[in-house]
Amino acid sequence: MTLDSLPPAPATQAAQARQTRQQFANPEDYLSYELGKAVRELPPLYTRLLAGSLSLLIFGTIAWAHFSKVDEVATANGELIPSSQIRPVRALDGGVLREVRVQEGDEVKQGD
């Protein structure tokens, strides 16, 4: 057994307790000691992972809101009324019609 492995003598423990009480007689001193101790020690792994995940989520949401474009869409009920009953149908490019194979009122099937 070495001297380092022996527990401190009761007199030493009492002296340390007395010194600690005197050292932290003022509550502000105790608070600053605890804050300094908390700053020196790292929080547990799960706390760091949770804080990192939340930070990443918040940063990602802000980045998404900044860089993405959202279309504004409105849905409403309504009725479409043409200005006249007859609408002319024209070809996009001009041409000559050679033959009309149907009459008005004929039923036309696909492929005819």
Image: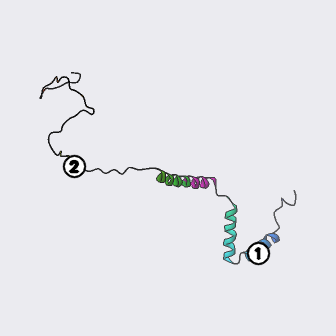
SS assignment at label 2: loop
Looking at this view, is 47 or 108 the one in front?
A: 108
Q: Callout 1: 10 Å neighbours few (<14), some, many (20+)?
A: few
| Residue stretch rendered in magenta on the structure | 43-53
Residue 47 image position (x, y, % from top left): 60, 55
Residue holding disc 1:
18
Residue at point 85%, 60% (across, down): 4
**Can you tell which mark lies on residue 78?**
2
Q: Callout 2: 10 Å neighbours few (<14), some, many (20+)?
A: few
Prevailing secondary structure of the magenta residues: helix
| Type of the residue with mark 2 | Gly
Q: How is the image coloured?
A: rainbow
Looking at this view, is 103 or 42 the one in front?
A: 103
Q: Quadrant of residue 31?
A: bottom right
Residue 57 image position (x, y, % from top left): 52, 52
Residue at point 74%, 75% (across, down): 23
Looking at this view, is 59 or 40 the one in front?
A: 59
Q: Quadrant of residue 22?
A: bottom right
Q: Is residue 112 magenta?
A: no
SS assignment at label 1: helix
Q: Is residue 46 magenta?
A: yes
Q: Is 94 situated above or below 77?
A: above
Residue 88 image position (x, y, % from top left): 18, 37
| Type of the residue with mark 1 | Arg
Of callouts 2 and 1, the N-terminal one: 1
